[in-house]
Image (cartoon, rainbow, N blue to C red):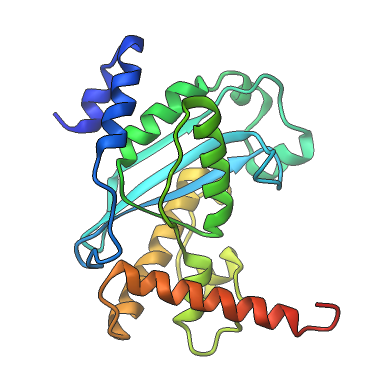
Amino acid sequence: MGWFDRWRGRGKEDDDGRLRAWRALPRPARHDRLDDATFVVVDTETGGLDPHAAALLSVGVCRIRHRTLELSDTFEAHLRQAAPTPDDNILVHGIGRAQQSEGRDCEDVLLEFLAFAGRPWFVGFHAGYDATVLSRALRTTLGVSLDTDWLDVAMLLPALTADAPVSANDLDGWLDRCGVRNFARHSALADAFATAELFLVVLARAHAHGMRTVGDLLALQHAHLRRRIVAQSTQPGG
């Protein structure tokens, strides 16, 4: 029985101990080899565009280990909302009023998320958004935070693509360009899978460029972010 399976059998009285156990897990290290590292790819659906205020509606997670996407190793949950989000927001993510009112308790979802994820390298597309949303929910509900750098596919793909504009950061555009299909756009798990497929492209291109560690990817990501900031500042009105 694995860590996640043991966690599912917990009682409420065990939650503090489980959080202590999660905190005690070893953190990933920048020298982790790309071929050996574990990556957890995350996507969230929210009730708005501001990650500092929007309600967390759903989270979808999948895992890459040894540069292989583990199709059966996933986690997805919808969180119960005190009040439904506006209709125009529902049109985007498709999580209707009934599904929002019948979702799962936020604390239970976040505890299971931590149990599933462990302490990997987290990956997202526009990762800063998902990281902010999740960190806010975890800090408010459980008093914990995800205190590692996230890998952002929206930064890494253009950095590893010779003819891509420095500002190219549209998920649908990269899915088309890389020939990746998304089986249910704006489903958290489907978007996590699509992002994971793109991250496999990142890993292949990074390997071809001689990159071998997670630290190499983080350095590339930070360099690309600096180039993007410079490019934006030199635009008219920037």
Q: Residue furthest left?
A: 1
Asked if residue 167 can be seen in this view, the reply is no
The residue sitting at 72% across, 78% down in the picture is 232
The correct choice, above or below, for 150 with respect to 164 in the image is above
Location of residue 37 with respect to 138 vertically, above or below: below
Which quadrant of the rendered structure holds the N terminus? top left
Residue 33 horizontal/vertical position (percent): 22, 67
Residue name at image x 73 percent, y 31 percent: 85
Which quadrant is home to the C terminus? bottom right
Left/right of residue 36 with respect to residue 55 in the rendered view: left
On the image, the x and y values in percent for residue 131 come to: 52, 48
- Of residues 149 and 130, the one nearer the viewer is 149
Query: Is residue 29 positioned above or below 26 on the image?
Result: below
Image spot of residue 210 (x, y percent): 28, 84
Residue 58: image location, x then y, percent: 54, 36
Q: Is residue 72 left or right of residue 150?
A: left
Q: Is residue 204 visible?
A: yes
Which residue shows up at 39% across the image and 62% down it?
197
Most foreground residue, 35 or 216: 216
